[in-house]
Image: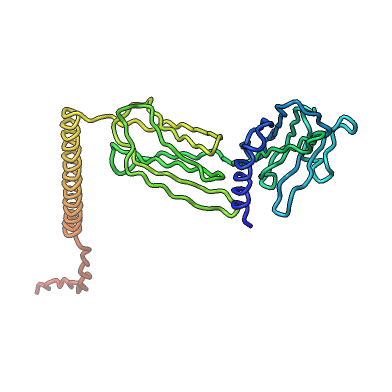
Amino acid sequence: MSNGAFLQGCFMLTLLSEGLTAVIQTQQTVVAAVGEDARLSCQLMQHKEVLQVTWQKVLPEGEKNVATYSKRFGSRVTLNFREKVEIKDAGLKNCSIVIREVMEQDEGCYLCLFNTFPDGAVTATTCLQLYELHEPILHVRESNSTQESLVSCSATGRPAPTLTLNVTQPHLHFSRYNTVSVHNSNGTVTVTTTAVLSGFRDNSAQVGCAVRVLSGHKEVFMMIPEVKQTSADDFTLSVVLACVGVAAVIIIIFFIIIINILLKHKCRNSLSQGDSERNKTPQRTIKDAPESQTPLVTQKNNQI
């Protein structure tokens, strides 16, 4: 038999025995979070001679004694439950037990038996139901539209938690909800809800995520980025600034091209002037070698 089917059978046992055990006042279902202490109580409402009060746990194979109380022997917890269970309000008409740091194996139904004389045992059933709830995780990020944000909340619990998104400003609203559930190997369920938040908001806007599992409740809040509404004047100014910016870029590019052309022209002129100077430089002349001069022989005319 599965754990869920067994617990359902325990709850049915509680309902069926309610009419038979109206003489005992008890809470049909005790809800507790995993890791907390759970208190189970029974009170006998009629005047009867009670010899002993016994607590038993209902198991698939039968009932198993957990604790007993009597005037003769006092409070006693059986060996298997001694580290988990403590008797409180010990009495023959009103008796309670506390299960410390409840875990999944502690979940189920418990019987309290008032052993009376001479009528015999009078019983009632109370069932312990556990829940598990972890801190939710909230994310807010901008979407492609300046007027929308994408809100996502994720929470893990047992049984499956219920998630509710809310926002502090009434003119904001959620749309396009999407919820996904993932069953984990430890019996918990992770639920993620995503929605689109639309509308303009100031810097005081908050988005929240409320998570519930049975009697457990957790809630987280987060500031969302401010998005201001753009007026017609703002739009015109934005267009003008954009046009001025484009024109400035064009002018800068134009000046860069002109300067580049001037620099290239100047460079060419410098090269041409250098070539002209080299052409004007006189070449080295080779002097003619001195001709060998024949010495003139001056003949004196002999005068005869």
Identify the residue at the far left of this view.
304
The answer to which of 144 and 256 lies nearer the viewer is: 144
The answer to which of 59 and 17 lies nearer the viewer is: 17
Q: Residue at x 70, y 34 (%)?
A: 40
Q: How is the image coloured?
A: rainbow
The answer to which of 119 and 57 lies nearer the viewer is: 119
Q: Residue at x 80, y 39 (%)?
A: 67
**242 relative to 158 in the view: left or right:** left
| Percent position of residue 90, x then y | 80, 28
Q: How many marks?
A: 0
Q: Residue at x 87, y 29 (%)?
A: 71
| Percent position of residue 165, x then y | 41, 36
| Percent position of residue 135, x then y | 55, 38
| Percent position of residue 30, x then y | 63, 36
Quadrant showing the C terminus: bottom left
Q: Residue at x 28, y 29 (%)?
A: 228
Q: Quadrant of residue 216?
A: top right
Quadrant showing the N terminus: bottom right
**67 relative to 295 in the view: left or right:** right
Identify the residue at the far front of this view.
118
Q: Quadrant of residue 215?
A: top right
Task: Name above or below for residue 59 compared with residue 53.
Answer: below
